[in-house]
Structure formats: structure tokens, C-alpha cells
Amino acid sequence: MTELSLLLFNIVAGGVRVIIYLFLVFRLLSTKKPGKNGIIVSLIGAAVISAVLSVTNLPDAYHILLESIWIVLCVHLFQDAVVRISLFIGIFYEIAISFLQFLVAAWLGVLFHSTTFLSSSTAHGQLAVWLLYLLLVAVSLYLWKHPNLTRKESFRFASIIVVACFIAVVTLSQQTILPIPDDTLYMWTILSVVLMMFVLVFNMNRQYEVEKELARLKSEQAELLEREYRTLSHAYEINAKLFHDFHNHIGVLRQLLSHKKLQDAIQYLDELQTPVLEMTNTIWTGDETIDYLINSKAQAAESCAVQFQIQVEFPRHTNLKSADLCAIIGNLLDNAFEAARQVPEKEKRFVHLTIRRIHQMIIIKVENSFSSIPIQEDGIFQSSKEENGLHGWGLKSAQAATEKYDGTVQTSYTHNTFRAVATLSYHGVSID
């Protein structure tokens, strides 16, 4: 092949590697989707690196290092990826590509009894490279169309690939058709083991991150439960005092009315009215914490001019924990009120809460109005808040709570209504 053709092949191959890496980081680290600007800048940098290294004939190690640094810098700037973990993925990604390229070329050489496949400067060598890239593109398309792969499924998928590669390189050392130096086979055998360790370490790191996230969610749930129990206890204390002193209030009212002091009696009743109304306006579910939570949201709805409709059918004496119900209902309602408050027309602001029991299932549905189409990233609707604080954990907290009861949270929207539905399985518990 001519030097110009080889240069063009290397540039295009570098572009394919970069695109696949951007998608890989997006899927593995749940970063932003690769944008147009990020893709263009990444491709330009990869093309420059490929062109410079092709002209200078530097070893492949320089290509791996420079391209790794460049793509990591791009995903950090354009996809907000963490440098440390993305660099970790980038280096092993480049090693894996080189390893797979060697395996494909070597086995094609064995199949066709030709050593020309091992040299990327030949037509046969380029055929091996592009066969590999076609396979990588096919795998990427499969992952793109199956975004709901769980962490265990992804780990199993990656493990199968690296183990198959290890077997393939070990088998190469046993064949006698294609002469391959022992040092080369020894090097790739060690790297295959390193890649298996990478998959294991990465999975352990992701498991640690998940456990840390769950620990934070549990801490937030505990804080929420403690705060609401404390507020609820205070409210009950006020009302208990009111009913305890009820006979005294009756005596005062009788005295005022007997002296025909009607205005004073009305004023006295107004002073007693607030805690009584708080009790009568409460939506009772049988769970004191949820009762207070819904009632406090109803009071907040009045202050921000949001129509809040509530329909509740809740079973008694179940295995559903108050902390988990608070995480689900509280976060869904917080998101709903946040969106409804942004509707300019006050008369169009609404939030509807519906809780229904269907056999051994609890359906919690929250519907609300919104002013603009929700932003969706990686299949998840994002908050319109600019800050990422605790709000970013809202749906994650609700989802984590529902999964404890074999449930899920699903979201959808029409032209003017956003809908979040949480489903939970439950069973009754006996009360001694």
C-alpha cells in the first residue's frame, strides 16, 4: 500500500476508535451524551495524532499513550467525565483494541496461511483491522439498542469477551501454521490476564460506588424520617393539649356567651381553629409519617398557588416501611411541585397524587403540569434545576426504595402533563 493510503487508513481507524470510546464512557460512567462539538474536536485531535505518528514511525506505545490522553481530555471537557476513572478506562481500552487487532490478524493468518495479515501496512493487514472495527461497531450498536442492561449483565458480557480472548491467545501458542515469536505471544498472554483483572477491578469499583450511593440514600431517608417524626410529634402535642383543655375552653365560651360577648367568643374560637383545621385537613393513610408528609405538601401547595388533588386507598398493616414510602412519595411530589410552580398561568398549575391498592400491589401515581418539555438523558428525565445538590438523588432514591419491594418507577409525559408511577409489591403483617 502507498504511504498516502496507509495514512488515510490510520486516520479513519483513529476516528472510529474515538467514537467508540466516547460511547463507551457514556455508557459505563453515565456521563453526558457525546455532543457534536465534542465529537468533532475528538476526531480532529485523533487525526492529528495518527498523522504525526504515521510520519514519524514512532512505536505503538506512543500512539496508545497520546490517544488515551487526548480522548480522556475530550470526555472530561465535553462529557463531564471524571479524569481518573476515564483515564483508567482509556488506557485499557487502547490496549484492548491493540490486543483484539493482533488476535484477529493472527487467526486470519492461520486460517489463510499468510503472515501478511500481521502487518497493518499491507492490504491484508488493513482488512484485519477493519474486520475488527466492524465487529466493534456491531457491538456498540447492540449496546445502544439495549440501554437497560444491568451491571451484572454488562460484567458477564465483558467477562465472556476477555476470557475468550485469553483462550484465543493461548491457543495461538499451540498452532504451527503461522510462525509467531514466543516473546510476542508471551506479551499478549500477560496483557490478556491484565485485561481480565481490569474488568474485575472496574466491576468492584462500580460495586463500591453503588454501595456508597445506597448508603447515602439510606442516610437521607433516615434524616427525612427523623425530621418528619419530630414535626409530627410536635403537631400531635399541640392537638393533644387542645383536647386535654377542651373542658376549660367550653367553660370560657359559656362564660362569654352568657354575658352576650359574641365578638369575644368568635375571636376565642378563631384562636382555637388553626390546630383543629390541621387535624381535619390531614389525609389519613394509616401511616403517621405519610399522613404528615402529604398534609405538609398540601399546605405548601396553597402557598405556591398549585391545585393539589389527593386520592388515597392505602392498605393497613403491611411490610412497607415508612422511610421507603417517604423516599418515594416525597421525592415524586417534590419533583412535581418544582415543575408545576414554573407554569406561568396559576390556574394551570396542578399536582395530582393517587395511591391505589390492586391485589398485592400498591400504585403511587403523581401527575403534574409543566412549562417546558423535560430533559431526558440516558433514558432518565432530568431536573430543571441548575444546581445538582440533593435534588439529583430524588428519582434515584425513589427507584432504590421501590426496588426493595420488587417495584419500579416509570415516567412519561403528554403535551401538558408529566406522569411518574411507582409500583410496589407488599404483603400483610400480623399485629400482636
Image (tube, rainbow, N blue to C red):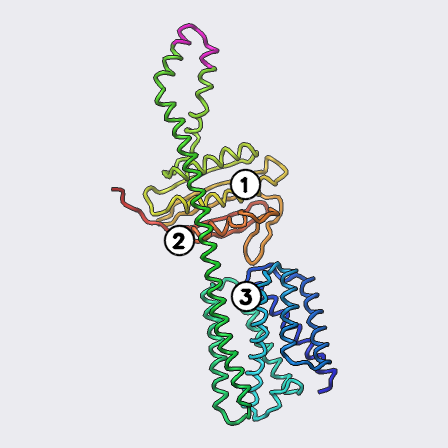
Residue ID at (33%, 45%): 318
Eye-nearest disc, 3 or 2: 2
- When the figure is inspected, residue 200 is found, relative to residue 312, above or below; the finding is below
Residue ID at (50%, 50%): 395
Main secondary structure of the magenta stretch:
helix
Residue 353: percent from the left, percent from the top? 47, 41
Residue that mark 3 sits on: 145
CA gap, disc 1 and disc 2: 26 Å
Q: Quadrant of residue 83?
A: bottom right
Residue that mark 1 sits on: 337
Residue type for callout 2: Lys
Secondary structure of residue under mark 3: helix
CA gap, disc 3 and disc 2: 27 Å
Residue 215: percent from the left, percent from the top? 44, 52
Residue type for callout 3: Lys
Residue that mark 2 sits on: 404
Q: Is residue 241 magenta?
A: no
In contact (CB < 8 Å): disc 3 and disc 1: no
Give the quadrant of the N terminus: bottom right
Q: Residue furthest right?
A: 4
Question: Dot 2: within a 10 Å radius of its alpha carbon, few (fewer than 14), some, or many (20 or more) residues?
Answer: few
Question: Dot 3: within a 10 Å radius of its alpha carbon, few (fewer than 14), some, or many (20 or more) residues?
Answer: few
Q: Nearer the viewer, residue 161 or 257?
A: 161
CA gap, disc 3 and disc 1: 33 Å
Residue 66: percent from the left, percent from the top? 66, 72
